[in-house]
Image (spheres, rainbow, N blue to C red):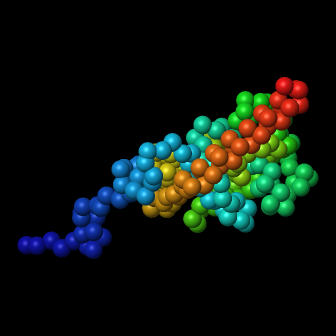
Amino acid sequence: MSVSQSPTEEYSSMPKRAKMDISLVLGFSDEDKVGTIQPYDDALVVTLRIGRYDMKRVMIDQGSAADIIYPDLYKGLGLKSENLAAYSSPLVSFEGRMVVPKGQIRLPVQTGTDVVEVDFIVIDVYSPYTAIMGRPWLHTLGAVSSTLHQKMKYPSGDRVLEIVGSQAAARQCLVAAIQHWSEAETSTTADNGL
């Protein structure tokens, strides 16, 4: 004698499928170095969409605890001092000087289709970069950067996307910074009558 099962009983006795979670790996290999000029020690300088504009000379800096914009970008976006929120903590510039920020402003930063709202600190000092993207932005995006590979990788949905740095832009920024500091030093020496 055979016992028939209802469709529900039949379904419930079937093995259940394991839920497939895709684990994205954010890593780098020697293949990621293809196209870079070796050997080098260039900073990771990229182009990012900040506000509504593609901004060149944006430095990705894992060592920075703040996301910074400089006067060129601030003025280029048409921002005014009344657009700034107060920000009172002093920062240390590349030259080792204490710098009092002009304020803080929240702007969208787009990578691919992903948009992250970033609280930028506005600093009115010379920089060859238009902005510095530090750990707050990197961590919010879930990104990993590598100056060795001249890339930044981040998860987007079920894929890993990347932003490739520009060694030419990094070297132009380095030359501009050296030239500026040299001129500033010459000016200081002349002001001191030496």
**Total marks in image:** 0
Nearer to me, 163 or 21: 163
Check the image and name the residue furthest to the left: 1
Residue 187 in sight from this viewpoint: yes
Along the horizontal axis of the image, is 121 left or right of 59?
right
Relative to 65, does residue 50 appear above or below in the rendering? below
The answer to which image quadrant residue 68 occupies is top right
Look at the picture and state if 84 lies above or below 112: above
**Residue located at (77% from left, 44% from top):** 126
Give the position of the N terminus as an image quadrant: bottom left
- Residue drawn at (29%, 61%) of the image: 16
Residue 79 image point, x, y percent: 85, 57
Q: Position of residue 116 (x, y in %)?
A: 65, 56
Residue at x-position 73% and y-position 29%: 96
Does 65 appear above or below 85? Answer: above
> In which quadrant of the rendered view does residue 13 lie?
bottom left
